[in-house]
Amino acid sequence: MKTYLRDFYGCTASITDKRDGSARLVVRLSNGKKMHDKAHKNRNAALSAWYRMGA
């Protein structure tokens, strides 16, 4: 499953759930540059990383 997120400043993120329970967080700035692309332990860890970035 893929979830899309957006913050107040226009940055977008997607969290992709993998079969083994891990999740990949990809964050792009408003100009389209990739800022963060990392695999996390699970979906909640990826979501908390998104919130720590200031979203």
Image (tube, grey):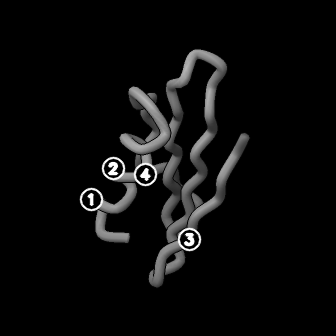
Percent x, y of residue 53: 30, 60
- Image check: 9 left or right of 49? right
Q: Secondary structure at mark 2?
A: helix
Dot 2 or dot 3, earlier in sequence: 3
> Which residue carries the number 3 mark?
6
Give the CA distance from mark 4 to mark 1: 9 Å
Q: Nearer the viewer, mark 4 or mark 1?
A: 4
Q: Label 2 vs label 3: CA separation?
A: 14 Å
* Of 7 and 18, the residue lying toward us: 18
Within 10 Å of the Cα at label 4, are there few (<14), some (14-19), or many (20+) other Cα atoms?
some
Indicate the position of residue 7 as horizontal and vertical percent values: 48, 75
> Looking at the image, is 35 positioned above or below residue 20?
below
The residue type indicated by label 1 comes to Arg
Residue for point 56% across, 71% down = 6
Residue bearing the label numbered 1:
52
The residue under label 4 is 47
Please, what is the three-letter code of the amino acid marked with disc 2? Ala
**Do the numbered discs 3 and 1 sit on residues whose CB atoms are within 8 Å?**
no
Amino acid type of disc 4? Leu
Q: Residues within 10 Å of mark 1 (few under 14, many from 20)?
A: few
Dot 4: what SS? helix
Mark 1 touching mark 2, by CB under 8 A? yes
- Of the residues shown, which amino acid type is indicated by label 3? Arg
Residue farthest to the right, as pictured: 1
- Between the residue at mark 3 and the residue at mark 1, the CA separation in whole angstroms equals 14 Å
In the orientation shown, which residue stands out farthest toward the bottom?
Answer: 8
x 55%, y 57%: residue = 13
Disc marking residue 49: 2
